[in-house]
Image (spheres, rainbow, N blue to C red):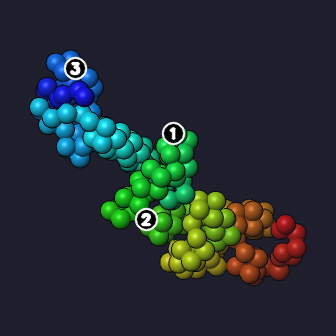
Amino acid sequence: MAVVTALRVAGRRSVAVELDGVRWRTLPLEAVVRAALAVGGELDRPRARTLARERRRLAALEVAARALRSRDRSEQDVRARLERQGVPANERDRAVETLASAGVLDDRRYAAGRAESLARRGYGDAAIRADLERGGVDAERIAAALEELEPERDRAETQLVRLGGGLRALRSLARRGFAEESLEGLVAAPDLTELG
């Protein structure tokens, strides 16, 4: 068995590990602590397994956290990113569970924020619903997010004015996911069958 002969700080959160007097690896501090590496202690098989498991766990958390730095994402999106990085399924699950329990990853918050963002950009409820479904958000959270928005009819009126009114604007709103019921009566006697 190899013996840990030195542990040296190698950065804010890393430790250089020396085995039998030879520099071995630089590892995350948390992995070193969880594996209970100590100067004079052996790097036996159980410690080596713990060290490997902790390194995988921390790598998965780092990938997930990097994905969340710029904006909220759905759990499904984070899982897909972890999968593309080659993170094993059990580590993906652990990373998502850890971030969700810490409140960093929250599908409810993601759905509400994404719905609000799309509504501000002029999308109707159908387009917002489809976007959230593609993001892996469940139907209950989608319904809650849509409920928080200004009524679709009011958003359609605002967008119609912004687009200059008329049948062309109505067609544009229909393409952006506004329901026919929300568009009815916004322009004098339109034939909504032409919107499709």
Q: Is residue 62 visible?
A: no
Q: Nearer the viewer, residue 45 or 191?
A: 45
Q: Residue at x 67, y 64 (%)?
A: 130
Crowd around label 3: few <14 · some 14–19 · many ≥20 (10 Å) = some
Q: Amino acid at mark 3?
A: Arg
Q: Indicate the position of residue 68 as horizontal and vertical percent values.
A: 42, 51
Q: In front: mark 1 or mark 3?
A: 3
Crowd around label 1: few <14 · some 14–19 · many ≥20 (10 Å) = few
Q: Residue at x 56, y 77 (%)?
A: 140
Q: Amino acid at mark 1?
A: Gln
Q: Indicate the position of residue 192 as horizontal and vertical percent values.
A: 84, 75
Q: Residue at x 19, y 38 (%)?
A: 37
SS at badge 3: strand
Question: Gap between marks 3 and 2, in whole Å?
Answer: 41 Å
Residue 158 vs 7, above or below: the answer is below
Q: Amino acid at mark 2?
A: Asp
Q: Residue at x 41, y 61 (%)?
A: 97
- Mark 1 = which residue? 85
Q: Indicate the position of residue 158 as horizontal and vertical percent values.
A: 60, 71
- Mark 2 = which residue? 106
Q: Indicate the position of residue 118 as horizontal and vertical percent values.
A: 57, 62
Please state if 8 lies on the left or on the right of 111 as rendered: left
Please state if 43 lies on the left or on the right of 173 as rendered: left
SS at badge 1: loop
- Mark 3 = which residue? 23
Q: In front: mark 2 or mark 1?
A: 1
